[in-house]
Amino acid sequence: MTKIETIPATLTSAPAALSELEPAHRLIVLVPDPEADTLPALHRIWELANARRAHVLFLSLCTDFKQEPSLRRSLITMAAMVQDGQVHAEAKVEKETNWVDSVKRNYQPGDTILCFAEQRAGLLHRPLSQILQSNLSTPIYILSGLYQPKPRWSLLSQIAAWMGFLGILAGFFVLQINIIQSSKGGLESILLIFSLIPEYWLIIFWNSLLG
């Protein structure tokens, strides 16, 4: 049966509850969005690893190969900040979209999984802790209050964004069709080229508004 425990942000450096925990082979920390600020959680992770005499594996998922080097550097930095004479830490990035599959692939008997209470996954953005609990039979610790997820667009925002892009493209498409029908020769080419300039800048401007 999966064991779920929530570790609050107010945890002190020498909690009796943690000192009584059984030793663990490894503490697998599921690192969320690389742009999120996870530094406040590192001391808590070190506390838990030190109390359980466990090694730490910082594990993250990546599907964008351009983002992988920066994500790997972030994880290596986190591992270096946690590692000391008592705790050994390492980092790993997997080209994967499914946390459950990744955890199953890396889990070894005796490991404990740690995720953040605010982490969400899947199409329905369910709490990751619930997804893990439903699919795994391993000890899971939830660290709460130390991670602020990057805001996600709502469905309506995404629809509005795509409607804006399509509106710009459709409007300039109609304009360019009119140019072709009403102009000839060199004038047609010049007008078409000039019509691309505002179209390009409108797309750039719309994209900047959406962040």
Image (cartoon, helix red, strand yellow):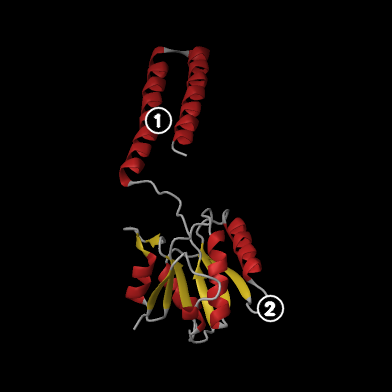
The one nearer the camera, 105 or 26, is 26
Q: Nearer the viewer, residue 117 or 196?
A: 117
Q: Residue at x 34, y 35 (%)?
A: 163
Residue at (46, 55) in percent of width and height: 148
What residue type is disc 1 on? Leu
Q: Position of residue 36 (x, y in %)?
A: 51, 54
Relative image position of residue 182 (x, y in whole percent): 39, 12
Which residue occupies 38% across, 69% down? 129
Residue at image point 46% right, 80% down:
17
Residue 76 against residue 168 in the figure, above or below? below
Task: Decide which of tag 2 and tag 1 comes sooner along the chain.
Answer: 2
In x, y percent, where is residue 185? 50, 14
Lateral position of residue 180 relative to residue 83, left or right: left
Task: Identify the residue position indicated by label 2 in the image.
Answer: 85
- Quarter of the figure with residue 93: bottom right
Measure the alpha-carbon separation of dots 2 and 1: 59 Å
Q: Secondary structure at mark 1?
A: helix
Q: Which residue position holds label 1?
A: 169
Quadrant of the image for the N terminus?
bottom left
Position of residue 156 in the picture relative to residue 56 (left or right): left
